[in-house]
Image: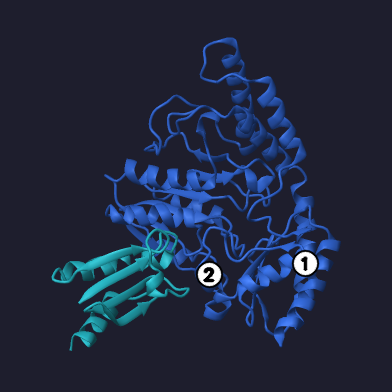
């Protein structure tokens, strides 16, 4: 499983969710995390709509789940558990 | 051509431009040079700075020139955070700020700073209860825009400043980019103020950070003598002189100009209220210079270009945050559809009734063309 977070520096929702994302990341040191910048990185293949941040869970290079907009750590955990079953 | 994007930038006033040209031609020295040409340039820069200080009722030494509000906001936020991090690492702001506030805050988060957001009421006004609840001894900075750039909500800066006096270890930064020269606001009890010349018919490329004399800042640019130790670089005395002129002109007949814009705003509201799927997002707490609306059946970009074909120029969101749902509109309306479909019409005392009439006529034509 790989976790990708796409955010932008001008996005206040990205600031709001950052702490929960970092906490989730620290508790799942076994997972590879990638943080991508909406303006700086090539994110064309992720088909981002108009909402940030976006969390993408991938398995063997294939997207298995996506969360758009603000989330809590609890929601991140719930999503992770759901797709890990 | 009908320009209705004055909140993005304003056309440079001829008087301001004349000052810039005259100073550039007549004062060719570097204000840091010791010879006569340098001394003359320095004297001129100091005189213009005194004028700005008098207009704003601050000390000349409290004025830091920057390239614009984005730099001023960055300098205020990073400068305070890095200088006073031993006091605490908590910063409070709102969901109604410009991207040049969120940018440095995002950066500071990666350094371990905690950023928290104040709640706003149904009008988008910061709730004092939320401020009281979230303030603590670890909070070193509160940053709030006096007027939001997309919807135009005017915050009760004086009340917030008064409340924050109870927390002498916390600084209050106000981004006044959209309010200066438009509304009368007291700067009393505010520690840091950002604004820019090009929003007040000045030249693009100069802004200002007013910093109370008791405050230290960590500079963003190190090295090289300038007008202050907080921002290095050769003093741009032609820009400073033109900035002083722009500020002075913007303060002239302020109430008269406000009333003129208010009347145009009412004209627009009246003209748009007959359309059932057009929503006005700028509520009664917004300044009249900004009218944010949502046309739910049209993409904002399509609407913008449809107006462009008729030589009318408006904005989709703030010019610096294109590409996302408008968080500011969402904060005020709590409606995602409105936040996805918002456009900003921004007015000036230079706007005429004929221009607004033409806008409304074209709006009607575009509305009926795309409504099908």
Q: Are marks 1 and 2 on the same chain?
A: yes
Residue at image mark 2 = B326
Instruction: Name the quarter where the N terminus of chain B is drawn.
Output: bottom right
Q: Nearer the viewer, residue B192 or A68?
A: A68
Image x and y of residue B93, in percent: 44, 59
Asked if residue B195 shows in the view, the reply is yes
Asked if residue B281 shows in the view, the reply is no
Vertical comparison of B232 with B275: above or below: above
For mark 1, give the secondary structure: loop
The image quadrant of residue B219 is top left
- Check the rendered structure and report the hue given to chain A: cyan
Name the residue furthest right. Answer: B354
For mark 2, give the secondary structure: loop
Question: Sequence order check: which comes first, mark 1 or mark 2?
Answer: 1
Classed neighbour count for the residue bearing mark 1: other residues with Cα under 10 Å, few (<14), some (14–19), many (≥20): some
As measured in the structure, the alpha-carbon distance from the residue carrying label 1 to the one carrying label 2 is 25 Å
- Check the rendered structure and report the hue given to chain B: blue
Image x and y of residue A46, in percent: 37, 74
Q: Are marks 1 and 2 in contact (CB under 8 Å)?
A: no
Residue at image mark 1 = B310
Image x and y of residue B266, in percent: 77, 68
The structure residue drawn at horizontal position 80% and vertical position 65%, both measured from the top left corner, is B356
The image quadrant of residue B29 is top right
Q: Nearer the viewer, residue B336 or B304?
A: B304
The structure residue drawn at horizontal position 15% and vertical position 68%, both measured from the top left corner, is A29
* Chain containing mark 1: B
The image quadrant of residue B296 is bottom right
């Amino acid at each position: 499983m790989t976790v990708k977070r796409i955010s932008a520096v001008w996005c206040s929702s990205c600031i709001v969710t950052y702490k929960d994302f970092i906490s989730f990341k620290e508790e799942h040191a076994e997972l590879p995390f990638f943080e991508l910048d909406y303006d700086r990185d090539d994110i064309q293949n992720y088909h981002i709509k108009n909402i940030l941040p976006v969390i993408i869970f991938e398995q063997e290079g294939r997207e298995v789940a996506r969360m758009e907009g603000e989330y809590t750590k609890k929601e991140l955990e719930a999503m992770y558990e759901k797709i890990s079953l | 051509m009908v320009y209705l994007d004055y909140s993005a930038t304003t056309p440079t006033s001829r008087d301001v431009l004349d000052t810039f040209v005259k100073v550039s031609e007549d004062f060719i020295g570097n204000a840091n040079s010791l010879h006569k040409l340098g001394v003359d340039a320095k004297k001129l820069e100091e005189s213009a700075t005194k004028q700005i200080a008098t207009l704003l009722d601050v000390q000349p030494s409290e004025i830091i020139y920057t390239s614009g509000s984005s730099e001023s906001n960055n300098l205020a936020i990073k400068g305070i955070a890095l200088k006073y991090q031993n006091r605490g690492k908590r910063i409070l702001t709102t969901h109604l700020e410009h991207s040049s506030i969120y940018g440095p805050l995002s950066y500071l988060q990666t350094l371990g700073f905690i950023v928290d957001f104040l709640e706003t009421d149904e009008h988008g006004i910061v709730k004092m209860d939320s401020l009281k609840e979230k303030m603590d001894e670890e909070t070193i900075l509160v940053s709030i825009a006096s007027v939001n750039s997309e919807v135009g909500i005017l915050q009760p800066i004086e009340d917030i400043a008064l409340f924050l006096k109870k927390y002498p270890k916390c600084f209050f930064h106000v981004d006044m980019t959209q309010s200066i020269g438009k509304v009368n606001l007291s700067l009393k009890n505010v520690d840091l103020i950002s604004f820019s010349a090009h929003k007040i018919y000045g030249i693009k490329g100069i802004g200002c950070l007013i910093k109370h004399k008791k405050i230290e800042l960590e500079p963003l640019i190190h090295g090289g003598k300038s007008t202050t130790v907080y921002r290095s670089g050769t003093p741009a005395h032609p820009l400073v002189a033109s900035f002083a002129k722009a500020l002075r002109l913007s303060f002239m007949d302020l109430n008269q100009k406000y009333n003129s814009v208010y009347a145009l705003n009412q004209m627009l509201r009246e003209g748009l209220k007959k359309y059932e799927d057009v929503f006005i997002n700028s509520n009664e707490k917004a300044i009249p210079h900004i009218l944010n609306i949502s046309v739910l059946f049209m993409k904002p970009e399509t609407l913008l270009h449809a107006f462009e074909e008729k030589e009318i120029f408006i904005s989709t969101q703030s010019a610096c945050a294109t590409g996302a749902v408008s968080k500011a509109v969402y904060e005020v309306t709590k409606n995602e559809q409105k936040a996805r479909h918002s456009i900003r019409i921004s007015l000036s005392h230079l706007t005429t009734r004929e221009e607004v009439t033409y806008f409304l006529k074209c709006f009607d034509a575009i509305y009926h063309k795309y409504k099908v």
